[in-house]
Amino acid sequence: RVGPTLPVLSDIATGAVQSPTPTVERFVNHFLRELNFGQGVLLSRSTINDQYIALAKTVRKYMMADWLDTGAKRREGGTKTVGYLSAEYLLGRQLSNALLATDLQDIAADALRECGIDIADLRAQEIEPGLGNGGLGRLAACFIDSLATMDVPCIGYGIRYEYGIFRQTFEDNRQVEVPDSWLSLGSPWEFPHPERQVRVDFGGRTEQYTDDEGRERSRWIPGWNVLGIPYHQMVPGFRNHTVNTLRLWSAKATQAFDLQIFNSGDYAEAVRAQTFAENISKVLYPEDSTPQGKELRLQQQYFFVACSLHDFIENTLPQDFDLHHLPERIVFQLNDTHPVIAIPELMRILVDIKGFDWDDAWDITRQCFAYTCHTLLPEALEVWSVELMGKLLPRHLEIIYRINKNFLEEVAEAFAGDEMRIRRMSIISEHPERSVRMAYLATIGSSKVNGVAELHSQLLRDKVLPDFSGYWPDKFTNVTNGVTPRRFVFLANRKLSDLVTDAIGDGWVTDLEQFKKLEPFADDPNFRQQFAQVKQANKERLYNLLKARDGLDLPRDAMLDVMVKRLHEYKRQSLKLLHIVSMYDGIISGRVSTESVVPRTFVFGAKAAPGYHIAKETIFLINSVAQTINADERVKNVMSVAFPANYNVTLAEKLIPAADLSEQISLAGKEASGTGNMKFALNGALTIGTDDGANVEIRELVGDDNFFLFGMDEPQVEELRAKGYDPESYYQSNENLRATIDLLASGHFTGGDRRLAAQFVDNLRTQDPFMALADYQSYLDAQARVDEAYRDSDAWTRMAILNVARTGFFSSDRSMRDYRERIWNV
Ligand code: AZC
Ligand code: PLP
């Protein structure tokens, strides 16, 4: 078929280029052209993958004019840009989001139908780019979506990992990791620009010299280098003709590297050199929150940061831009400490390359950075040994020392030489080995420091960085996290979106506070009935998927109780497991009759870091418990446990809209914020949760009556810890708890083998570092309240509607407004 073509976008001036008005016929035409001339196949001979790629490339054409236009507008406007520096972007599938942003969903579906293709099959073909571990990476993806939707100039900078977060499979109930080769079937959403390569140096030594003006200076004589190749992705705003850019860097070997160091005439050796260089962007480190301190990881961090700063300064700013004005044009947001090496890197560029005085450079640098901390766990605060830093980045280490020296002089002056304080505040810690505390460097080198929920920001000020917040009270602020309503409500929950839009119009998609208008509908029986039908339909959709995907057969009418997040001791999947086993024990021991219980389906989703032993044991035990319970006739129809493998964004989009109950049960004071908790509430699940992270704010907004609170709060946790926590005393004094743990230990769930549960049980009884046993009774009591509430399904639905109506605050659009006002001034 031949039809009209897209215009040639040769000479772009702001606003001058219009995308073609989409029609079904045009879309068919563009799609078939992509299939024929792009993939080189006829429709009749094309595979689903051919069709998916052709569809993706068709959709991106409809974004192209806006992308070029946005770029031109940004260059001409001379406005300030947000440079979001993040080692992770957990993007999720791109196709549906692009169709939504461009409003092409219906046209594309119709067009494909004309070609005899069901668009759902093509959506399912996409492998999601899993370039992140969990909450932190997904947050970055939500933020860039919101910035595009709000038309804020933003470049997302990161790493194009060849392998993202591993694919999880289970073998004999144990987690087995499989490489995630997300690029293997082609990646139609990225635009490589090898001609824009950037050279990144590593290693070598520094050298002191006197410059032309007689100043003592230092210069870096690097030992080796690699090239960074940028891959661009479009970040479309929601139907606003803005398309921002995500720029991910891929490492490639340089010629110089081969020749200078490794080329001994030995072919194998020369290839090894290339492999070595390209390893830098080969794979995402699968540790969530707990850094490993590996050399390759520091290489990754410096690699993408050096590429990004170079890209902005040399390729994005106008030529001859006076860098004294840099803070007027860029603010780099540091997504946790992973990109913090950017601070000494900017100093190096300004002082060593551009010849600035140290003090001028420092003044500029501090204005250009802001730092977000995402954790409270001390073990999650990155430190790099001085030895490693000196070997890999000798000049940066020198710069860090000088920053530290100047800073400590300032502290000494302000606090009359208070030695203890000076030692506490030093970027360099001496124990257990000399190392660089990246969170301190970030704090000293940034204009603002923020936590990610009210409680977290308060604890960050009071517990993690008290000396710094005392010294610079105004530097510290809070921005509570948010999630994008486009992906996590509109796309993930079409039925709810339609219902809500019928009730209050569609303004909520970009102004989620409008959900407030739903409040009166909570008292409308007709609306409640429709709302309950939506929930039921979402459950059916999920169960059909789990049947097809995992062969799971789940009952249709039980309460759906969901705990999905990375597996971490502090998140306490162990406590959830204790609840399940207690319920099961109650029934099989005859204490509780099946007629009296509220039937529940429990769903877990969680990946464990491959080297995190106790987390993997927990996965094994959950799977073992699930297997036993699902096979036990005595609890048939009242209990089932499902653990679909490989929890990722794609699965989250199906699971969250179906849930009745959201499990947010971390030990108080450990979960910085959580964002899964927000997604559940916005999709009409009720939360059972501790007073932790953003749960606190969720509960404040939805009200105590619409939230199941349990457990110690953070001061109580501290108090118990100070008193000396003895998990065994809870085991001894609580009969149900004892029965539950004994049943776990008995081998009942592990084919009679007591050893297989021993580590898990021993850990709980003797260490229990996250106090699951202390919160156990309170948790079970709260679960009993959940059961009571669920029995009155109409009242439950009312509470669910109020959760939706009152959580519009958790839009990432609101988070971005807060960053603009409190941190960025853009
Ligand atoms: C997570 C926090 O654990 C989670 O509470 C928060 O919601 C999320 O960041 C987004 O702010 N942190 C991480 O994933 N990783 C690290 C290094 O903390
Ligand atoms: N992993 C995935 C795939 C997610 O989609 C999310 C958030 O929705 C998270 C992890 C973070 O979950 P939580 O906030 O519960 O830790």
Image: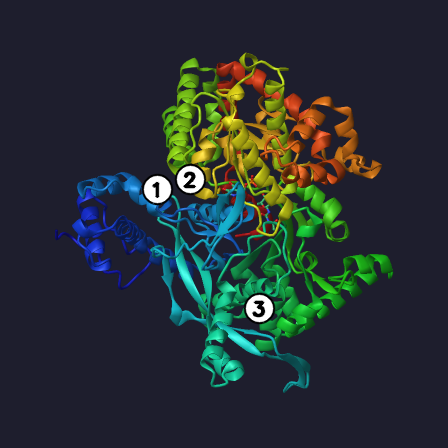
User: Is 442 left or right of 69, judged from the image as shown?
Assistant: right
Q: Which residue is mark 1?
A: 100
Q: Regarding mark 3 in the picture, which secondary structure is present there?
A: helix
Q: Residue at x 24, y 57 (%)?
A: 39
Rendered location of residue 422, percent (x, y): 81, 60
Q: Residue at x 51, y 48 (%)?
A: 176
- Alpha-carbon span between mark 1 and mark 2: 8 Å
Q: Which residue is mark 3?
A: 324
In the image, residue 348 above or below residue 769: below
Q: Is residue 355 among what the camera can see?
A: no
> Ligand 1: does it lie within 8 Å of the C-beta at label 3?
no
- Mark 1 or 2, nearer chain start: 1
Rendered location of residue 570, percent (x, y): 66, 41
- Mark 2 or 3, nearer chain start: 3
Q: Which residue is mark 2?
A: 486
The nearer-to-camera label among 3 and 1 is 1
Q: What's under tag 3, amino acid-wise?
A: His
Q: State the residue in front, 543 or 624.
A: 624
Q: Regarding mark 1 in the picture, which secondary structure is present there?
A: helix
Q: Regarding mark 2 in the picture, which secondary structure is present there?
A: helix
- Alpha-carbon span between mark 2 and mark 3: 39 Å
Q: What's under tag 2, amino acid-wise?
A: Arg
Label 3 Cα neighbours within 10 Å, binned few <14 / some 14-19 / many ≥20: some
User: Is 405 left or right of 282, judged from the image as shown?
Assistant: right
Q: Are marks 1 and 2 in contact (CB under 8 Å)?
A: yes
Q: What's under tag 1, amino acid-wise?
A: Leu
User: Is 494 left or right of 622, judged from the image as shown?
Assistant: left
Q: Residue at x 61, y 65 (%)?
A: 295
In the image, residue 243 above or below residue 765: below
